[in-house]
């Protein structure tokens, strides 16, 4: 796994050290108060007058201004920053609405886009049957040559065939005559100096289905290795796969929970460009290494939502790639779609596959042995345990208590010492968990001396109590793991949080007590 700082798709200047919290706050404050760009010169030779300074009092406008002008020291995600601005636009005053329009404009809107990446010279277009790529003919936004623009078009065609043709997702809604015709539009622009790799922006709501939108994408004009630290074609492939999936998502429900939008888009990179492995750099921020951080958390200044692509990798390895599409179909609106929120839709899809609680707990336990769980797991980090104990005959028992956040887990490790050599030794695992209404789940993993692994569920009653006996003889058993999972999906929704349904989790920090005792049968 690379040690370079994660940078893709974020408002962050490449190769810039992580800023302090104070610097980040000052950067956002400056963007919120000023949000004014210099006067660009356009193709006709005229200078666009400086727009009147606007105090960005709305947080969505302040964040989008900071992201799109490259003035933030944080790590905000451009696509969702623009999504949130688009969603907030009807509530803005006239001056702020005008500024929002500039941020959401297409590059070919030229003078309407002085805050963003509007072209200042004439542009050219290359089209396939389904996609058009637009690029500046000269200047800082121009690609190295026409051949690179053609490569972008070829990659976008491949992404389209993969996402829509092979995996069966809806095509993004047609934008009519925007960009020239109804084909999907992609623009090339110098984004690296703003710290961006690419983004997609929602543009117009569909009349009958206001939660579905048309969209367009903007990608860096060359993905130069000097800026992005990787072969340009590799960066192009993963960015195109990720961002075009956002355009597809906007055609289902552009307002969906951000953790879902980002974790599945990062998972899509693995489906389309498995050989690049750029998404491994985020594993250290997700549940592979921080298992007690809720799965549905979206942290605009962090990376957990990117790192949790492994949750979808785990599920689709067992149930097929179509599982994510089925969740998105339940999230979607129009055509009889249920319009559920992310965790609700996931719960429904998994209801015929043992349920979310069983699958989540198995995922969490599997992260303790990634080499046995994922196809490329030998190159993934091993999830940490919160405690370990080595039992021996003089001390054959132990007991621990802890609290687990919602959609999160904690694990313990128990080892036999050499006094338990006989195969007749067993380990009793005794769990006192929260009530069944809060969806607790417990998995016991056994790592054998020969390197093989096994995993079993502890059956919990309505009070959350359960027991399980597994082998513990050291001649056969290397160690035993116990994974405690709080798989609650109960929320008080629409409370302005970054969790699922913008809700407050009703079962956070539930208490588990686990006891172990070695005995000889």
Image (spheres, rainbow, N blue to C red):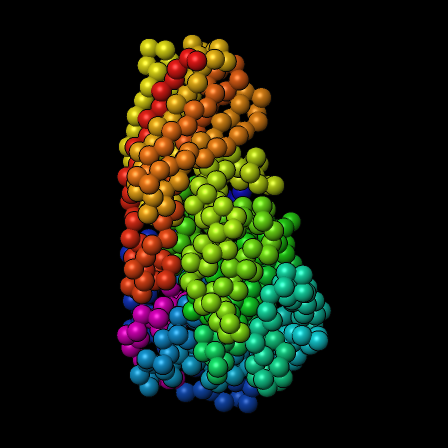
Residue 397, can we see it? yes
- Residue 66 shown in magenta: yes
Span colored in magenta: 50-75
Query: Which residue is drawn at the image coordinates 63% and 60% (left, top)?
Result: 167
Q: Which is more toward the observer, 159 or 434?
A: 434
Q: Which is more toward the observer, 397 or 229?
A: 397
Q: Which quarter of the picture shows residue 453?
A: top right
- Residue 384 shown in magenta: no
Residue 238's spot in the image, x, y percent? Answer: 59, 58
Residue 227's spot in the image, x, y percent? Answer: 54, 58
Residue 464's spot in the image, x, y percent? Answer: 33, 38
Q: Is residue 274 above or below residue 471?
A: below
Identify the residue at the far front of this view.
Answer: 462
Q: Main SS type for the magenta part? A: loop
Query: Which residue is drawn at the image coordinates 48% and 42% (left, top)?
Result: 363
Q: Which is more toward the observer, 39 or 11?
A: 11
In the rendered image, the quadrant that contains the N terminus is: top right
State left or right for residue 37 relative to residue 23.
right
State left or right for residue 366 relative to residue 400.
right
State left or right for residue 313 relative to residue 284.
right
Residue 172's spot in the image, x, y percent? Answer: 57, 73
State left or right for residue 293 relative to residue 209.
left
């Amino acid at each position: 796994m690379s040690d370079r700082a994660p940078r893709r798709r974020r408002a962050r200047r490449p190769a810039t050290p992580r800023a302090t919290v104070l610097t980040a706050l000052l950067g956002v404050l400056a963007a919120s108060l000023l949000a004014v760009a210099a006067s660009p010169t356009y193709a006709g030779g005229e200078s666009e007058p400086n727009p009147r300074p606007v105090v960005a009092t709305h947080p969505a406008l302040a964040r989008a201004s900071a992201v799109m002008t490259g003035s933030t020291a944080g790590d905000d995600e451009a696509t969702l920053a623009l999504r949130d601005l688009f969603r907030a636009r009807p509530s803005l005053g006239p001056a702020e609405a005008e500024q929002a329009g500039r941020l959401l404009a297409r590059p070919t809107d030229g003078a309407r886009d002085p805050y963003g990446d509007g072209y200042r010279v004439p542009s050219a277009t290359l089209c396939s049957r389904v996609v058009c790529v637009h690029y500046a003919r000269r200047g800082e936004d121009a690609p190295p040559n026409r051949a690179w623009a053609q490569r972008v078009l070829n990659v976008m065609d491949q992404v389209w065939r993969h996402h829509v043709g092979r995996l069966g997702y809806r095509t993004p809604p047609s934008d009519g005559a925007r960009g020239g015709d109804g084909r999907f539009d992609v623009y090339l622009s110098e984004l690296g100096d703003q710290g961006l790799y690419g983004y997609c922006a929602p543009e117009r709501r569909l009349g009958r289905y206001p939660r579905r939108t048309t969209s367009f994408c903007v990608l860096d004009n060359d993905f130069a290795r000097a800026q992005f630290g990787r072969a340009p074609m590799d960066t192009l492939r993963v960015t195109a796969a990720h961002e075009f999936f956002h355009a597809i998502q906007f055609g289902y429900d552009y307002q969906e929970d951000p953790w879902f939008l980002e974790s599945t888009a990062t998972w899509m990179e693995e489906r389309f460009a498995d050989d690049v492995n750029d998404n491994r750099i985020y594993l250290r921020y997700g549940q592979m290494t921080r298992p007690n951080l809720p799965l549905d958390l979206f942290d605009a200044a962090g990376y957990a939502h990117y790192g949790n692509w492994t949750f979808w990798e785990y599920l689709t390895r067992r149930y097929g790639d179509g599982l994510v599409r089925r969740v998105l179909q339940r999230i979607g609106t129009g055509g009889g779609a249920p319009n559920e929120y992310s965790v609700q839709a996931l719960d429904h899809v998994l209801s015929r596959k043992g349920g979310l609680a069983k699958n989540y707990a198995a995922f969490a336990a599997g992260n303790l042995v990634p080499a046995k769980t994922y196809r490329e797991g030998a190159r993934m980090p091993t999830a940490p345990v919160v405690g370990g104990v080595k039992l021996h005959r003089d001390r054959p028992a132990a007991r621990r208590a802890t609290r687990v956040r919602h959609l999160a887990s904690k694990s313990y490790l128990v080892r036999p010492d050499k006094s338990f050599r006989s195969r007749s030794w067993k380990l009793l695992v005794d769990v006192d968990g929260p009530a069944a209404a809060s969806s607790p789940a417990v998995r016991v993993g056994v790592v054998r001396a020969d390197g093989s692994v096994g995993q079993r569920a502890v059956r919990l009653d309505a009070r959350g109590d359960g027991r399980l006996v597994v082998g513990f003889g050291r001649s056969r058993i290397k160690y035993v793991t116990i994974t405690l999972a709080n798989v609650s999906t109960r929320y008080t929704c629409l409370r302005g949080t970054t969790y699922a349904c913008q809700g407050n989790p009703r079962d956070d920090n539930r208490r588990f007590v686990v006891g172990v005792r070695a005995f000889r049968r």
